[in-house]
Amino acid sequence: MVTLAILLAALLAGSLVYSVLIIVAARRYLSQKRPNADTHLPISVLKPLSGLDEGFEANLRSFFEQDYADCELLFAVRDESDPATAVIRELQAEYPDRSSQLIITGVPPYPNAKVFSLDRMLKTARYDLLVMSDSDIRVEPGFLSSIAAEFADEHVALATCPYRAVAGESIWSKLESEGMNTEFLGGLLVARMLEGVKFAVGPTLVARRSVLVAIGGFNVLKDYLAEDFVMGKLAAEKGFGVILSRTIVEHRIGSETLSANAAHRIRWCRSTRRSRPLGYIGQVFTYPLPVALLACAVFPSWWPALAVTAAIRALAAWSTAAWILQTRPHWLLLPLQDVLSFAFWLAGFFGNTIVWRGRRYYLYADGRFDLR
């Protein structure tokens, strides 16, 4: 029991240190000055599409309504029968002055169909600054202006846009949004503070064309499930400036059933484990509340540690959700989400296959994947 007590105490102490680091990292992120350069770099927006997400039309409309003249919108679908096609045609007719184009890609030869769509759009894109954004992203009218200002700094070559998750009606959607707005963003901020930004993650990335050329283009990324992470990693290794943007976007995650939600959470966990195995093991310190609950279950007299942990975890959650994303944590859902996330993290250690868009894939040890 002594060995177990020492182990749990070490895990709990490490988790509390990590939570404090989130708070410090959030303050440092906010302390950086927002760029205010009046920059109008021409921008190509690349949006790979497949089917209709919840709020799909409003998401796309937010890009058509950008207060930014020097941009083009490129959309890619596999074939004309995709229901996204009709929505795009309607928006193009509604906004005839907005430069936009729909590309029919055909059947993707790459394991990662999204990367194939991006590759096709890149060949058509006219401009050097590229915004790669998923279909479930909604932005403010000044989004592109804000991005252009950040890239006025010639050192900045690739940026990850933090996102505020907006849940659908299902409880699983709401739980997931809590994790995205607190746990996930907290991890990005701590990594940025401790080692700099050597990654790119999330549903909206911005990159100069020169970065993609230098890393070998999308052809290098086509076999990876976490192509965004690999893109940022390769760019950093090449010496390009990679940042965590100050421009926030909305990630409209929609409503999901338990089975659908569990499937993509498992996909993320297994993909992360394969992409950075040591980092995945280290994620144990990102779960202070589950660790404290486990410690109290074994040693009930440790209940004061649970109270302290809950308070520090709450402040860490507030620092990401309220300070940065301008939203508020749901205090009743947060503990449940933390426990659920911990359970999926444990499950991520097992299995090497994922299901993505109805197909089963095998994950290799280096993060690549292929049809099973």
Image: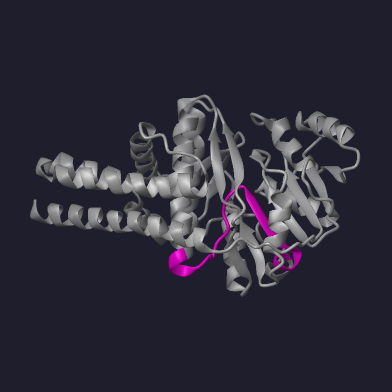
Q: Nearer the viewer, residue 83 or 18?
A: 18
Residue 273 visible to the viewer: no
Most extreme residue toward the bottom is 239
| 55 over 320 or under it: above or below | above
Q: Quadrant of residue 337?
A: top left
Q: Going 81% across and 46% down the picture, which residue do you hit? A: 73
Q: Residue at x 64, y 50 (%)?
A: 204
Quadrant (top left/top right/bottom left/bottom right) for the C terminus: top right
* Left or right relative to 10: residue 358: right
Relative horizontal placement of residue 270, taking residue 346 as reference (left or right): right
Q: Position of residue 176 (x, y in %)?
A: 47, 36
Instruction: Find out whether residue 67 is within the magenta segment.
Output: no
Q: Which of the two residues, 345 or 362, is positioned nearer the viewer here? A: 345
Residue for point 21% across, 44% down: 306
Residue 325 in view here = yes
Residue 142 in the image: state x and y as whole percent. 71, 48
Q: Is residue 251 above or below residue 171?
A: below
Residue 223: image location, x then y, percent: 63, 54
Q: Is residue 12 left or right of residue 93?
A: left
Give, as a single range, the part of the protein colored magenta: 193-212
User: In the rendering, at what x and y percent does residue 196 appear?
Assistant: 50, 68
Q: Is residue 203 magenta?
A: yes
